Amino acid sequence: MLSTGALRAHLLAARLAGPVATSREASLRSYRLFAARDPRVMLGLDPERAWGERDLLGLMADKCGVSGDPGHVSGPDVIDPERTLTALDAFARRLRGVMTRGAPVLFGTGHPHRLLEFYAGLADALSAAGCVVLTPAQGRCIDITTRFGVRTYALDYVRGVALMREPGVVHAGSATGAHTHSPLPVRVALEGLAEAGGPLPELVVGDHGWVCGAGQLGIEAIGLADTDDPALFVGEAEGRVSVAVPVDDAVRSAYYRPLTRYVLNRACLSQ
């Protein structure tokens, strides 16, 4: 069992919280783009209200613990570990809820090289507890706009977690998928479920477009988000994302293992 104190210490030591690798400049740029409704940072969310840069800075200070001072424009950004722990507890409660109901769940990540193992551990535990971990539309090709133009990727699953790969590149069971923030994969996955007449997920677990894209469609969604990902926290503030956990989303994959253990224990899913 991992105590709250031990996890807090790990968050700080691994720079998952506290001063993180995400720069203040990157976060402020994302807030500016979000205020301008740039689709690159909206992640599939269509906010109900206008969010200006000052509004977003205030929200992120409240949700993540970043500095609310608009004059602070450089250096590393900061995540309050207490906010991370509180959000992880809420995240675990949602998992326990679907476990209790034996409800279907969909997992997906746009950061497979970093976060796949975190989600896979949760998917394994929910599957063992009797939940259906959905894997719809496997192999479906999706055109996604990137900074290099439109690229075609294929939807794949590893241990029940969706990710995108370049078509024809076979790395069965590996985390070498594409980095994407697009909401298109979750839309295609949900469309595949509807076409097959199967159950829709009662919960989507993931990050970036997987969470915001599902939440925008009215499906309960929870996930991890960095300080330069305001969309998930706006979605949470507006009631379309159930839980956004503030955490650096780009540290070494192994550093998320204690988070998996903590969440599974809190959700009474420890194997």
Image: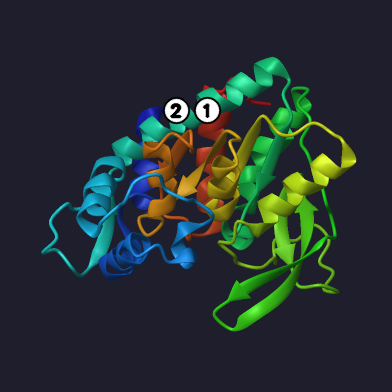
Q: Give the CA distance from mark 1 to mark 2.
A: 5 Å
For the point 59% across and 27% down, the residue is: 95
Residue 63 visible, this orientation: yes
Q: Farthest top residue? A: 100
169 over 106 or under it: above or below: below
Report the side of 70 relative to 85 (left or right).
left
Circle 2 sits in a helix, a strand or a loop, which is it? Answer: helix
Residue furthest to the right in view is 196
Circle 1 sits on which residue?
A: 92
* Residue under the image location 28 percent in, 48 percent down: 60
- Look at the image and tell me whether residue 120 can be seen: no
How many numbered markers are drawn?
A: 2
Residue type at the position of mark 1: Ala
Residue type, label 2: Asp
Identify the residue at image location x=63%, y=44%: 119
Are the residues flagged by discs 1 and 2 in contact, CB closer than 8 Å? yes
- Residue 19 position, x and y percent, is 28, 56
Coordinates of residue 218 in the picture (x, y in percent): 58, 36
Q: Which residue is mark 2?
A: 89
Quadrant where the C terminus sits is top right
Determine whether 207 is above or below 252 in the image: above
Other residues around mark 1 within 10 Å, as few (<14) / some (14–19) / many (≥20)? many
